[in-house]
Image: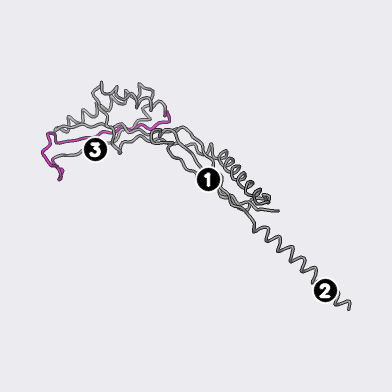
Amino acid sequence: MLLGLSIFAGLAVLALSLLVSVKTIKSFDRFVSVKGLAEVEVAANRVIWPVAYKEIGNDLSSLYKSINDKNRVIIDYLKSKGLDESEISVSAPQIIDMSAERYQSQQSTYRYNITSVLTVTSEKVEKVREIISSQSDLLQKGIALSSGDFQYTTQYFYTKLNDIKPAMIEEATKNARNAAEKFAKDSNSKIGRIKNANQGQFSITDRDGNSPHIKVVRVVSTIEYLLRD
């Protein structure tokens, strides 16, 4: 009789323990997954500006001399505007021999078409933008820069992402928690600890097509919160 009572008591304790375990496991199954957005506008801190122009003619040696002279004029002009010579690089001229072009529809007046490219790479973004807006000054020096060619598009970059990452992650996490708390309130629950978190990928894009020097930095974090009654 005593043995039977002992076995019954043991089974009762085991059943109660299992019930508590099941409830605990089940509570861990209840969670909400939310996304938090953080977005900020920043000014680009690096610019790459290809300064390109063309020369045409029939005598290569004369063309090379003209290009070297004009390159010097451009470099001196850029330096007078506040750029350092170390921020300016000169590429080898790109030469097209028009007489060797298979698809030339008609005989060209000039045999050679040469493109010279100087590249400005600088962190003086606003200064470079000012120079670009006044580059017509070079026309007075006999130099017409190429424009509208996709090969020579000015590019702007933001390279200080690590400086703003912590604050953006904090903002994204805060926004995600606000969303989770709203969900919990609507479902008569409370937010528990974080079950899982994904920081998300940072993206840097132009604010718009007319302002490539203004960037939008964006991150979307995904966070799972446990729910409890």
Q: Which of the two labelled residues, at mark 2 and mark 1, occupies the earlier sequence position?
A: 2
Residue 141 percent across, percent down from the top left: 25, 21
Label drawn at residue 94 = 3
Distance, label 1 to label 3, CA atoms, is 44 Å
* Mark 2, other Cα within 10 Å: few <14 / some 14–19 / many ≥20: few
Residue linked to disc 1: 220
- Display coloring: one colour
Q: Is residue 180 above or below residue 98?
A: below
Residues at circles 2 and 3 in contact by the CB criterion of under 8 Å: no
Label drawn at residue 8 = 2
Q: Is residue 184 left or right of residue 216?
A: right
Distance, label 2 to label 1, CA atoms, is 55 Å
Q: Is residue 131 above or below residue 159?
A: above
Q: Which of the two labelled residues, at mark 2 and mark 3, occupies the earlier sequence position?
A: 2
Magenta segment: 99-125
* Residue type highlighted by circle 3: Gln
Residue 18 percent across, percent down from the top left: 74, 66
Local secondary structure at mark 2: helix
